[in-house]
Amino acid sequence: MAGPDWRSKLHSVAAKHSACYKSGDFSRVDDIDAGDRSSRSSRSALSATVEDDEKLREIGSEMISGHESVTGDVKDLADDLRDNRVDSSTAAERMQKKRKEALEAVGRIVHDGFDKAARHIESLPEDQQSGAADLYLLISDGFMKFWEMAWGAILEIVKAVVGWDAGLWEEVEDFWERVRNAFEAAWAWFRSLS
């Protein structure tokens, strides 16, 4: 019964993550992790159940890198708007469009990651599948907490550009610092899993 159990757990969390990405509301991240994750509380305990977790770590790394790349696209637009001194309505329209595109792009990244993880886990010996699923859920749930911080700052950037207040670009730079800090913390956390 190990097979169907890990699959349903993986699909359930993937559906919850997908709902967060579709709505843009990451405040439910703690709800996602609220289930029984005691078996995932220790990375060393998981290592004992999964002989080769490099593929799952690679998928997790791709997820973080992908989110970082999409965030870079949003920053590039903000920098372009600042440097080219566009009018406020054009800036607002372009930032709203980029916010929507970014949310769709990172949603696809997470969906693809879950698909890759499921295919990899399926290829493992049955006695390692549940532990491997738990490891991937540790990675994806953990990163969601960091993404919630980064996305919150990105939304503040969009709001600042749309509001077009005095001191706009200084405020935007402060929010980009929060985004950078969130990704630095995410990478440090991810590296600590090994």
Image: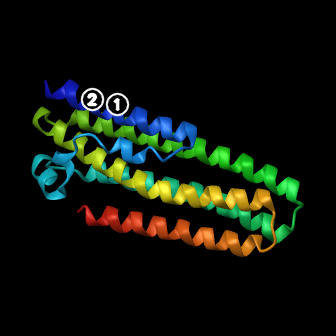
Asked if labels 2 and 1 touch by Cβ distance under 8 angstroms, the answer is yes
Q: In which quarter of the image is residue 103?
A: top right
Q: In which quarter of the image is residue 130?
A: top left
Is 58 situated above or below 16?
below
Residue type at tag 2: Arg
Q: Nearer the viewer, residue 172 or 183?
A: 172
For mark 2, give the secondary structure. helix
Is 67 situated above or below 129?
below
| Residue 81 shown left or right of residue 159 in the figure | right
Is 164 situated above or below 25?
below
Q: Is any atom of residue 62 visible in this view?
A: no
Query: Callout 2: few (<14), some (14-19), or many (20+) C-alpha neighbours within 10 Å?
Result: some
Image coords of residue 155 (percent x, y) = 63, 55
| Residue at horizontal 57 percent and vertical 72 percent from the top | 177
Residue type at tag 1: His
Image coords of residue 181 (percent x, y) = 49, 70
Image coords of residue 63 (percent x, y) = 43, 51
| Residue at horizontal 87 percent and vertical 62 percent from the top | 86
Q: Which of 106 and 147 is in front in this view?
A: 147
Quarter of the image where the C terminus is located: bottom left
| Residue at horizontal 40 percent and vertical 42 percent from the top | 113
Q: Nearer the viewer, residue 192 or 161?
A: 161
| Residue 86 shown left or right of residue 16 in the figure | right
Q: Is any atom of residue 67 visible in this view?
A: yes
Q: Give the labeled residue for mark 1.
A: 11
For mark 1, give the secondary structure. helix
**How many numbered tags mark residues here?**
2
Image coords of residue 114 (percent x, y) = 38, 38
Q: Give the labeled residue for mark 2.
A: 7
Query: Callout 1: few (<14), some (14-19), or many (20+) C-alpha neighbours within 10 Å?
Result: some
